[in-house]
Image (spheres, coloured by chain):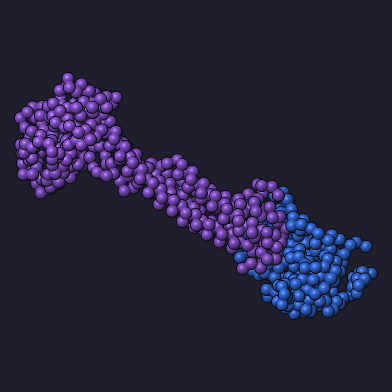
Chain colours: A blue, B purple
Amino acid sequence: MSKPVIEVTDLVKTYGEGEATVHALAGVSLIVERGEYVAIMGSSGSGKSTLMHILGCLDGPTSGRYRLDGVDVSDLNDQQLALVRNRRIGFVFQAFNLIPRTSALANVELPLAYAGMKAGPRRERAMAALEMVDLGNRADHDPNQLSGGQQQRVAVARALVSEPALLLADEPTGNLDSKSTADMLSVLDRINREGRTIVLITHEDEVAAHARRIIRLMDGQVVSDTRKAPRYAAEVPSWA
Amino acid sequence: MGLTEIFKFALRGVAANKLRSGLTMLGILIGVAAVILLVAVGNGSRVAVEQSLQNLGTNTLTVTSGRQIRSSTYSTELTLSIVDALKDRNAAPDVKSVSPIVQSQQTLTVGDTDHTTPVIGTTTDYLGASNSKVAQGEAFTADDYAKAGRVLVIGATTASELFGADDPIGRPVSVGGQIFTVIGVLEKKGSTGFNDPDDTALAPLTSVQKALTGYGPVNAITIVAVDADSVTAAQAEVTAILNTKMHVTSTTNTPYQIRSAAQLLATRTETAQTFTTLLGAVAGISLLVGGIGITNIMMVTVTERTREIGIRKALGAPRRVILTQFLLEATLLSLVGGVLGVIGAFIGANFQITGITPVIVPSSVGLALGVSIAIGLFFGSYPASRAAGLRPIDALRYE
């Protein structure tokens, strides 16, 4: 059995000091195996975004351990973390976060450029990723010439172009209409069928319905963890 | 990631917001151009003064009468007999020519046009002594001098003021009510920036005294030494003759002043240098203000892109790559703006500014360019390094 993609143990994250201390995460432990499709749900302030940012190595925990693909990321320095974000994680934001005034293709090429790939193959890979999200014909468009749904698909293409082990999506459909939401979900379903691990945050039940495992957070702690028709029955986490 | 690759990123970053990049470059351009041009104007006036004084000739001495000495019972005026004494080859072997000058401000009238100018009554030697040349017509002759002929040689400015584009030769001019005939026009000398040497009129000393001033003492005597090396010797000889003729006993308290063109050059150059320093100070202030402008625009430009830096970090951009990109962008903006500023200054220096032709000082180009680029680089890369040091999530949350 391969190592779990995500293995967090007793993760704590606090903001502020003294009286004003806020415990965003109060001891979260979690294992996500390769190929899983996990939805994290919870009301606002439950700590789901904080958890997501730590999982994406965008933020560090106050205490606790996080192993990504078996590597303890809390031991890594700034440069190594950049490498981890570049190679192992694809991140999709609620606000799309495409680089403005830069074409869709150039946006998708960015992670490959930072990985040091040459311009020729980089272009091919980026083009392939855009075609995967049905935006091959919009490669030259700047973000402001694209609809919200198209921008989010560009963001997904950018997250996947470096073929990361893990796709993290922070409310990817939060800013989309129902049609674009449906498009986005079908893209995610397809990616998951291809074997990619997906962890997403949502508070919409219809989005969560696509996931095969739903984790609910409240006040910085996991309150429920349910699976629908587990694909890998043998991989029930040992702590569950 | 290679440097050329990052350079392409930087180019794309500069091109992505053309208006913002353009304004940043404009700020640097104006700062650099203003400093170079201001210093060039100051320097230009200094060069102009030097040149115009050099036109006077460096072997000339000017004797002017000073204050009267009360204790002396002798005349201390510059009379024509002193002039004759100075012409004595034995007493003053280093003196080439002596030109007495009677100068008075007169109104010249031609038809309905009148113009007030200094009229100089002198001898035929004066043209050579004052480095003047006749461009049109001819100079007055020894014969005119002897007969006190009513002839006038006018400067280029005076000619255009009185006659416009018409040919002034042979035309009568009323000088203080007396009719003179224009026989020549002097070659243009050009402005010194302080007064116009072309606004003048020359006539034989005899006729000026007869018609206008009366037979009093002369205002000044222009003396030309044999060559530049004998100026000091000529000055000593002239001093000796003047002391004898005026019965001067104390050498510290003479009733006359002798100034050489070289001394005049030194004082005028000093004045011009003060002027340049003043303009330099103004330029320094504008460089400071320009620098603050560049600082401001660079800080805003980069701070505004903190979020973009967050996105790049989230995609796995190493700190070094982000820093290099922003440093290159700042370099591009500063360098292009600065070089355009230098080009602008060089173009601007071809035009006269308040009558002064600017002369560019090479060190001011280096200083203006260096300071602007240094400021641009520092304040372009400092906020970028601050943003690149943030955790991605903090940079992303930045509003």
* Residue A17 visible to an observer of this rendering: yes
Which residue is drawn at the image coordinates 73% and 64% (left, top)?
A: A58
Tell me if B179 is positioned left or right of B376 in this view: left
Q: How many marks?
A: 0
In the image, residue A142 sits, relative to residue B328, either above or below, namely below
Q: Residue at x 50, y 47 (%)?
A: B369
Question: Residue B287 vs residue B233: left or right?
Answer: right
| Residue nearest the observer in this picture, B279 or B13 | B279
- Single out the residue that lies furthest toward the right: A234
Q: Quadrant of residue B203?
A: top left
Q: Position of residue A149 (x, y in %)?
A: 68, 69
Question: Could you say where residue B282 lies in the image, as x and y percent from the top left?
Answer: 40, 52
The quarter holding residue B42 reads top left
Figure check: B161 above or below A50: above
Q: Residue furthest top?
A: B90
Name the residue at 76% across, 57% down.
A77
Q: Is residue B337 left or right of residue A179?
A: left
- Left of A197 or right of it: where is B378? left
**Camera-nearest residue between B38 and A144:** B38
Residue at image position (60%, 58%) is: B383
Q: Between residues B51 and A233, which one lies in front from this camera angle?
A: B51
**Quadrant where the image shows the C terminus of chain B:** bottom right
Asked whether B59 or B289 is in front, the reply is: B59
Q: Is residue B130 above or below residue A204?
A: above
Res B259 → quadrant? top left
Residue B326: percent from the left, percent from the top? 61, 54
Report x, y in % for residue B166.
Answer: 16, 41
Q: Is residue B347 visible?
A: no
